[in-house]
Image (cartoon, helix red, strand yellow):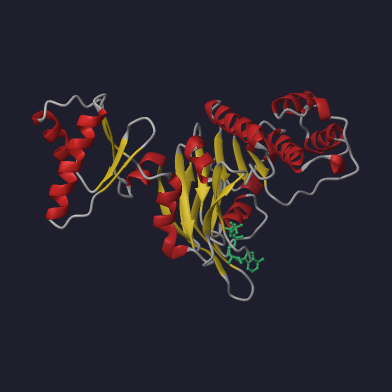
Amino acid sequence: MLEVQDLRKTYRGGKVAVDGVSFVARPGQVTGFLGPNGAGKTTTMRAIAGLERPTSGRVLVDGRPFAEHAAPMSTLGVLLEAKAVHPGRSVRRHLQALAATCGIPPHQVDDVLHLVGLAESADTRIRGLSLGMGQRVGLATALLGNPSTVMLDEPLNGLDPEGVRWMRHLMRTLAAQGRTVFVSSHLLSEMAQTADHLIVIGRGRLIADESLDAFLARVETVGLTVYSPDVEHLAALLRRLAGEASARGEQVDITEDADGRFHVEGLSAELIGEAAVEARLRVHQLSPVRASLEEAFMQLTSSDVQYRSTTLTLEGGATPTLTGAGR
Ligand SMILES: Nc1ncnc2c1ncn2[C@@H]1O[C@H](COP(=O)(O)OP(=O)(O)OP(=O)(O)O)[C@@H](O)[C@H]1O
């Protein structure tokens, strides 16, 4: 379990990176840590790992400051972007050296090599690995001590779509084993599929600390999906309702997809449902379209974005990702 209590970090020069943030990441859950560029995520994670001294506040891992744990690698496994890894060593040698230094049983090396899918590449020198394989080495290092809490900063960076799927599965598995999984990512659609709980920060302050569902429910639904096997009849009914609404000065938008499903904005479910009953029209679907995590995130953090050029882009043609101008 991770407990962050009123954490503040002001860098030399006066930059306030984290401004009184408190939250708890619980065992058995994947907790997603989101925020626009410069929100303070990395600073918070570095403070949790004991790499950054907070200006005030504290962080507890399983009830105690990380530095006070007798077996730190069995308490908190960390994958941060900056990796201090000997590039000339093989993957296996790197893990063996670390295990020996930290009093971790040698069999753990083979266990984590299998767990992260590196058994075949165990004798490759680290400098010869792709970015995605390097991420797996970082992950193997984080899991070497069989820790109760795992903290991963942008673990999907450098992974191909297969690697992203694999990482999602691994995170869910680690949580199902009862571990606390705390993970930052810019890949919001991935977080939507992976996280149970979200911590969202902006400009160093907490914006949201709630379940994924509660976070999505905060933004308005973006319309209704309506389907009837009697497509023509439904189309005529929707046209009539839209005409009546327009006459009242209301704006209605209706589009039909290739499967004959209508997406309707500006008419209520009650109105369509009642009208369908009166018209003796069979309706098989009348459901709200929830905002995606991207849309919810953009709405709820729009005033907290540090860099104005933050935009939604499609990476690799498929996965929406939040990018910004960087520092
Ligand atoms: N060593 C430092 N000295 C001064 N300012 C810093 C330092 N490290 C980070 N900052 C600033 O603190 C703020 C928070 O940075 P941080 O890296 O924690 O944000 P982040 O949410 O991880 O951003 P990103 O998603 O872009 O990695 C930013 O404005 C950043 O420029």
Q: Position of residue 64 (x, y in %)?
A: 57, 45
Q: Quadrant of the C terminus?
A: bottom right
Is residue 312 toward the left or the right of residue 296 in the image?
Answer: right
What residue is drawn where x is 59% and y is 48%? 65
Asked whether 79 or 50 is in front, the reply is 79
Asked whether 174 or 61 is in front, the reply is 174
Q: Is residue 295 visible?
A: yes
Is residue 62 toward the left or the right of residue 83 in the image?
Answer: left
Residue furthest left as drawn: 278
Residue furthest right as drawn: 88
What residue is drawn where x is 77% and y is 29%? 118
What residue is drawn where x is 63% and y is 60%? 53
The quadrant in which residue 239 appears is top left
Q: Position of residue 175 (x, y in %)?
A: 54, 31
The quadrant in which residue 171 appears is top right
Asked whether 7 or 257 is in front, the reply is 257
Ligand 1 positioned in quadrant: bottom right
Asked whether 156 or 264 is in front, the reply is 264
Whether residue 273 is situated above or below residue 324 in the rendered picture:
above
Is residue 11 toward the left or the right of residue 264 in the image?
Answer: right
Q: Position of residue 174 (x, y in %)?
A: 58, 30
Q: Is residue 1 visible?
A: no
Tally of numbered tags: 0
What residue is drawn where x is 22% and y is 54%? 251
Q: Position of residue 241 (x, y in %)?
A: 15, 43
Residue furthest bottom as drawn: 13
